[in-house]
Image (cartoon, rainbow, N blue to C red):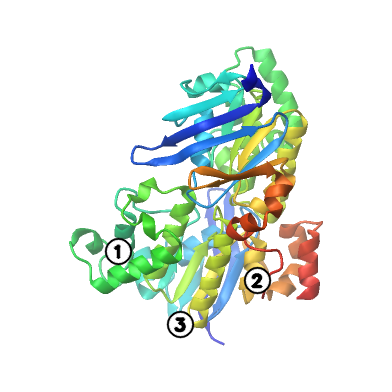
Amino acid sequence: MAESEAFVRFDGVVAGYGGGDVLKGVTFDVPKGGVTCIVGPNGSGKSTLLKTVSGLVRPRLGEIWFKGQQLVGLSPKEILRLGVVQVPQNHSLFREMTVHENVELGAFLVKDKKVIAERMDTIREMFPIVAERAKDKAGSLSGGQQRLVEFARCLMLEPDLVVLDEPSMGLDPKTLRSMFETIRMMNSVGRTVLLVEQNARQALKMSHFGVVLENGQVRLSGTGTEVLNNPEIGALYLGGTIEHTK
Amino acid sequence: MTTLLSAQGISKHFGGVNALNLCSLDVEKGSITGLIGPNGSGKTTLFNVITGYVKPDTGTVTFDGRDITNARPDKVFALGVGRTFQLTRIFARITVLENMLVATQREESWLRGLTRSMSSKSELDSAMEWLDFVGIARLAKLPAGSLSYGQRKLLELAYVLVADPDVVLLDEPAGGVNLTLINVISEKIRALNKEGKTFLIVEHNMEFVMNLCDAVTVMHQGTNLVSGSPTEVRNNPLVLDAYLGGGEEEDATEEVANG
């Protein structure tokens, strides 16, 4: 099947929320095993695009293929079952539940208790905070710590595709670095990552592929470095050239 | 130099957690002061205490020589202390422009902007001017709830500036905002500052803070750790350890060397 060449293929995706279309025909491929980063101005449709992958927004037109299977029309739960997990833009942990409980919830589609326990062990190794703060309420963790727990939770389903909406938002510089490290680590253990970032320079540096979304359409796509070094994109969306005049 | 806004010896605990522990902060009149620190160090709680959203257990807050400790948020706002929120707070069901008109009612009832049918021409002009500045003027007639997260942050920035406060507290103005637009916002803050407006800014984007601020206070575990010029703060070993972490990126190091 031709569609299986790309891990995820967006083909002419048009979507919006009632009033007008936010996405106006988005077409690009997400290659398997890489980190793909979507950048672009505020309101260009980045978050909406991610929501079409996880089934939270249903495209009006167009197709989304994942491992050769059509995602358009499937429910979020069916898409989750296929191995696509999204971490949303806003903090999404249950604040009154413990860290352990939150992470365990990530495996809600898995029925086998033994499998859950095994995955939990792996996760605790990958994310020490899950073990260290297991019994603390998630709401008592700082913003950065909550992000890491959200990552841990999303890996409990052992997804093939991890979708992240602005993972760096609100993180201090130290936590930011460890967050980007964690994304690299998730990728190195076999997860394909699709993310949206306003912290675009740093994100593109660690990404294999970059996509610039502008007014609901793909303006440019290429390797992370190509997007990063494109002078026009640099001036428009990446804060101008590197030498600043102070 | 005179101190415009001052918090002295502020403590605040929530249950067993000491969010603030004898924390002090001075903001000089006419300055752009940065407030940085790790996630969970108490920056937003301090903002909440200053602006009347949280009552401190100990300490005093003064603005322009006047004790505003425990004053209500609307009172603090009316006196001339404006702020934005880390997670945006806008009226989702009215339009972007109507949100702005509510904000122009600083010295009257906030709700008046909602209820009266006509705002003055100058209020409308000023509202549109600020929306244009943050790049969302074309969205003026849309319900604010239809804006993306980043656009809401921009609306909130316009919202606080249109009220023309004497001191503006910004909670992560660059978070979730496009890099090029961050530079535009940075330039505008500088221009407003030249006209005499004072800023206190919480932000994790170090390039933004270090380029813009005259003075920086670093918070750690609920108290002020270090205060000084951006260069002093950046090279302070305590700050490197608590906040910036080791292994600074090369370009950042070069900037320090050149600066």
- At x 50% / y 64%, what residue is drawn? B170
Q: What residue is pinned by disc 2?
A: B211
Q: Chain of mark 2?
A: B
In this view, which residue lies farthest toward the top? Answer: A112
* Secondary structure beneath label 3: loop
Q: Is residue B96 toward the left or the right of residue A113 in the image? A: left
Q: Are marks 1 and 3 on the same chain?
A: yes
Q: Is residue B64 toward the left or the right of residue A129 in the image? A: left
| The quarter of the displayed image where residue A128 is located | top right
Above or below, comparing residue A113 to residue A222 in the picture:
above
Q: What residue is pinned by disc 1?
A: B101
**Where does the image place residue A180, in percent across and percent down from the top left?**
71, 45
Q: Chain of mark 1?
A: B
The number of numbered badges drawn on the structure is: 3
Tell me the amino acid under the disc marked 2.
Asn
**Can residue B115 be seen at all in this image of the molecule?**
yes
- At x 54% / y 33%, what residue is drawn? A97
* Secondary structure beneath label 1: helix
| Mark before the other along the chain sequence, 1 or 2 | 1
| Mark before the other along the chain sequence, 1 or 3 | 3
| The quarter of the displayed image where residue A163 is located | top right
Q: What residue is pinned by disc 3?
A: B65
At label 2, counting other C-alpha atoms closer than 10 Å, the crowd grade (few under 14, some 14-19, many 20 or more) is few
Q: Are marks 2 and 3 on the same chain?
A: yes
Tell me the amino acid under the disc marked 1.
Leu
Gap in angstroms between the C-alphas marked 1 and 3: 30 Å
Would you say the residues marked 2 and 3 are in contact, meaning their CB atoms lie under 8 Å apart? no
- At x 19% / y 65%, what residue is drawn? B118
**Where does the image place residue A211, in percent across and percent down from the top left?**
62, 43
Quarter of the picture containing the N terminus of chain A is: top right
